[in-house]
Image (cartoon, rainbow, N blue to C red):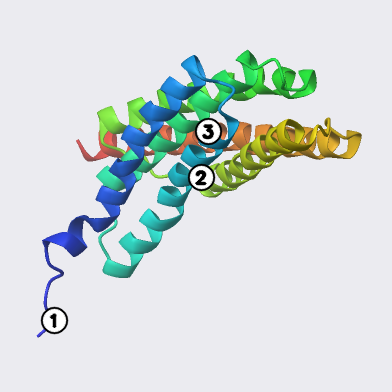
Amino acid sequence: MKTKPNWLARNAANMITLSAFPICFVLLWVVIVHRNWTLTILFLVTAIFLTDFFDGRVARYFKTISSFGAAADRLRDKLVMGIMFAFLLLDGRIHITLKVLTVPLAVVEIALLMIWFAEVKKKTDASAGRSGKIKMFLMSAATLLMLLNLIIEERWGQEYHLLATVFLDSLFLISLFFAVKSYLGHRAKHRAQLSAQLGQA
């Protein structure tokens, strides 16, 4: 007879996801009050990204994937990226091209957040699609590399090299493409699920 996972196993993935939210609020405070604490920001962002890396794997391992976990996962992603968009726009050390690319990315993320609210409210599938996962991976990599660049500049006096700037700009631009694709995919999926719900009513 197959035994059910215990309480800890059933809730492990959600606890990992939820642990990111207090870290996000600490990150927000640091970004607003102590934006020059780049190493601290890097540490906090890495911790949040690690929760994103592990929660899905734990949920699949224990077979405890849930709609709540999927919704919380997306909300966590939107929160950390929103905070980092604020950092990119406010910090004077950030290259102007990254600031320019941040604006449309932020607009699309707000649109995705609105879709997320609608999906949760209507109890449709709020999990991230393939494009969203690719976008999040690229944005995570770009964010970490950008912070590492700032730390190198602070510690060793090295300014942004042209190659690093072009590489980061490219990551942001590709992320924007997948962000738009993710939004269009979520909008189409949400409409199809709503139509299916109306058909069953």
**Circle 2: element type:** helix
User: Given the image, on which type of amino acid does mark 1 rest?
Assistant: Lys
Q: Position of residue 179 (x, y in %)?
A: 60, 34
- Residue wearing tag 2: 46
Residue at screen point 88% across, 39% down: 163
Q: Which of the two labelled residues, at mark 3 and mark 1, occupies the earlier sequence position?
A: 1
**Circle 1: element type:** loop
Closest to the camera, between mark 2 and mark 3, is 3
Residue at screen point 90% across, 33% down: 162
Q: Which mark is residue 41?
A: 3
What is the crowding at mark 3: few (fewer than 14 residues within 10 Å), some, or many (at least 20)?
Answer: many
Where 106 falls versus 155 (above or below)?
A: above
- Residue wearing tag 1: 2
Quadrant containing the C terminus in the rendered view: top left
Q: Position of residue 10 (x, y in %)?
A: 19, 60
Q: Which of the two labelled residues, at mark 2 and mark 3, occupies the earlier sequence position?
A: 3
Quadrant containing the N terminus in the rendered view: bottom left
Q: Nearer the viewer, residue 32 or 17?
A: 32
**The quadrant where residue 140 appears:** top right
Q: Position of residue 170 (x, y in %)?
A: 79, 37
> How far is disc 3 from disc 1 in space, using C-alphas?
44 Å
Residue at screen point 34% across, 26% down: 118
